[in-house]
Image (cartoon, rainbow, N blue to C red):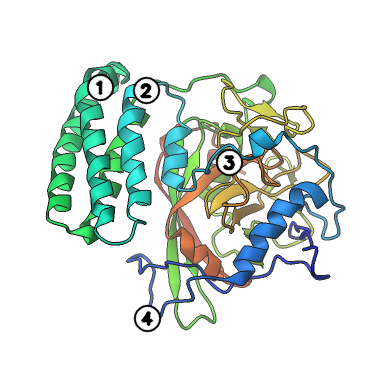
């Protein structure tokens, strides 16, 4: 049976307040999704507001569970200090979360990255003042690149230095082009150029990682391990939706922070485990799949005839390696920040039995929520469930998926060479 999630109940109503949402705001046409209709949806949803309130209240009234039981009991988590809960606005962009999650420590490149990311907030300003703010962002990034170029180059892995120099040259040229775009008052061209420049920055930062930074514990070292990152495309056939026929979701898997979890998933992808599988849950809070047909609650390893399970795996910000087998609450680390938080729409994680931290197998879910009221580690999932990736393209369309929609395929785009101990290559 598919893993279930008990919804917290809003204080002003008897029924659970986590219901399928009517739509996402600011929806934009995306080339990789077939959109016969250009009709836009409402820009505000009271249901979305209720979801955020209910999730925030869940910190006190009990946490929802992504376990196997449909009637799981609520937990009673210990609440961290208010100073921890209100620690500033959370980062919600999946690309930014992935950049900050890299195991690097190079202040110079972060000083280029930050003003480029701030362009997103600048574009929220009404009228021409937005471009004035963008221009300040661009100038700040340009100064940071000029002043910190040698420090950035010094942080690159030696084998990747030549590629890094080329990328920094492209970044400098791109910043000049973005400056001209702003001077021409071409607001529509800002965001695409920003995306291009942040891709350069992200690749430079990835080139700073020299090998895999730690040893996976011996008891898990023979499992499929993703020692780095990988990208996959998930193609879903949409049923009974006149506005959307099918969609391809690009997903980045982060093995630096979740090598066992991401490796398990990528190994199943190469086994074609998810191909042809239906979406099994879509309730406005999560989209979930991965429960195979038959009595088994996960992937049966043909070499053992048993369900393959993996441990709960959590990377804490500031730690050099993940912790395994216990939630952060169980470890007493109430103020700890997870490196991969449940902040982005389309955060990808493993479902498991509520009462068994090490019961995850093949069932996965994507989170569908706004996070203004649930910043990092102030929500009900961080530190309890293993995040191992983010949907980076077409994530808004996850809200359109319904139970019965079919995953036609998941294909690896890059990073398969980072998978160690792949079991799909073993005969039987």
Q: Could you tell which of marks 3 and 4 lies nearer the N-terminus?
A: 4
Residue occupying the point 69% across, 49% down: 351
One can see residue 279 in this view: no
Give the foreground label among 4 and 1: 1
User: Which of disc 1 and disc 3 is earlier in sequence?
Assistant: 1
Could you tell me which residue is drawn at 80 percent across and 70 percent down? Answer: 13
Quote the CA–CA distance across marks 3 and 2.
22 Å
Quadrant containing the C terminus is top right
Badge nearest the viewer, 3 or 4: 3
Instruction: Kindly indicate whether the residue at mark 2 contacts the one at mark 1 (C-beta within 8 angstroms).
Output: yes
The residue labelled by disc 1 is 148
Q: CA distance from mark 4 to mark 1?
A: 47 Å
Which comes before the other along the chain, label 1 or label 2? Answer: 2
Location of residue 34 in the rendering, given as x and y in whole percent from the top left corner = 38, 73
Q: What residue does disc 4 label?
A: 36
Badge 1 density bin: few <14, some 14–19, many ≥20, Cα 10 Å: some
Q: Position of residue 385 (x, y in %)?
A: 68, 42
Residue linked to disc 3: 341
Judged from the image, the secondary structure of the residue bearing numbered disc 4 is: loop
**What secondary structure is marked by label 3?**
loop
Q: Is residue 210 left or right of residue 147?
A: right
What is the CA distance from the residue labelled 3 to the residue labelled 1? 29 Å
According to the picture, the residue beneath numbered tag 2 turns out to be: 107
Mark 4 vs 1, N-terminal side: 4
Do the numbered discs 3 and 1 sit on residues whose CB atoms are within 8 Å?
Answer: no
Tell me what residue is drawn at x 68 percent, y 30 percent.
Answer: 335
């Amino acid at each position: 049976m598919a893993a279930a999630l008990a919804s917290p109940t809003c204080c002003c109503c008897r029924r659970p307040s986590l219901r399928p949402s009517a739509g996402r705001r600011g929806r934009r046409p995306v080339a990789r999704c077939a959109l016969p209709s250009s009709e836009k949806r409402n820009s505000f949803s009271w249901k979305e507001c209720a979801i955020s309130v209910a999730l925030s209240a869940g910190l006190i009234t009990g946490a929802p569970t992504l376990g196997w039981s449909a009637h799981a009991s609520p937990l009673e988590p210990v609440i961290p200090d208010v100073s921890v809960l209100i620690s500033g606005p959370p980062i919600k962009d999946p690309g930014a979360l992935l950049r900050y999650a890299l195991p690097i420590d190079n202040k110079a490149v972060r000083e280029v990255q930050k003003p480029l990311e701030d362009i997103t907030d600048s574009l929220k300003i009404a009228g021409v003042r937005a471009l004035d703010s963008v221009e300040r962002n661009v100038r700040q990034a340009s100064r940071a690149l000029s002043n910190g170029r040698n420090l950035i180059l010094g942080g690159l892995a030696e084998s990747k230095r030549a590629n890094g120099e080329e990328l920094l040259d492209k970044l400098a040229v791109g910043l000049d082009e973005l400056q001209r775009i702003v001077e021409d008052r071409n607001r529509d061209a800002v965001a695409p150029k920003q995306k291009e420049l942040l891709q350069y920055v992200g690749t430079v930062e990835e080139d700073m990682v020299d090998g895999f930074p730690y040893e996976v514990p011996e008891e898990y070292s023979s499992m499929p391990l993703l020692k780095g990152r990988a990208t996959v495309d998930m193609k879903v056939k949409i049923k009974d939706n006149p506005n959307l026929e099918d969609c391809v979701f690009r997903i980045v898997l982060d093995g630096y922070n979740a090598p066992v979890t991401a490796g398990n998933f990528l190994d199943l992808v190469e086994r074609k485990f998810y191909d042809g599988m239906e979406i099994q849950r879509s309730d406005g809070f999560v989209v979930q799949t991965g429960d195979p047909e038959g009595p088994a609650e996960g992937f049966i390893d043909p070499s053992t005839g048993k369900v393959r399970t993996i441990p709960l795996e959590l990377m804490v910000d500031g730690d050099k390696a993940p912790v395994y087998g216990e939630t952060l609450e169980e470890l007493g680390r109430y103020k700890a920040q997870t490196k991969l938080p449940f902040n982005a729409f389309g955060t990808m994680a493993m479902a498991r039995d509520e009462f068994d931290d090490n019961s995850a197998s093949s069932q996965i879910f994507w989170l569908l929520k706004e996070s203004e009221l649930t910043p990092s580690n102030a929500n009900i999932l961080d530190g309890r469930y293993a995040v191992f990736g983010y949907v980076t393209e077409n994530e808004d369309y996850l809200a359109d998926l319904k139970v019965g929609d079919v995953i036609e395929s998941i294909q690896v785009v890059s990073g398969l060479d980072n998978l160690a101990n792949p079991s799909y290559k073993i005969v039987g």
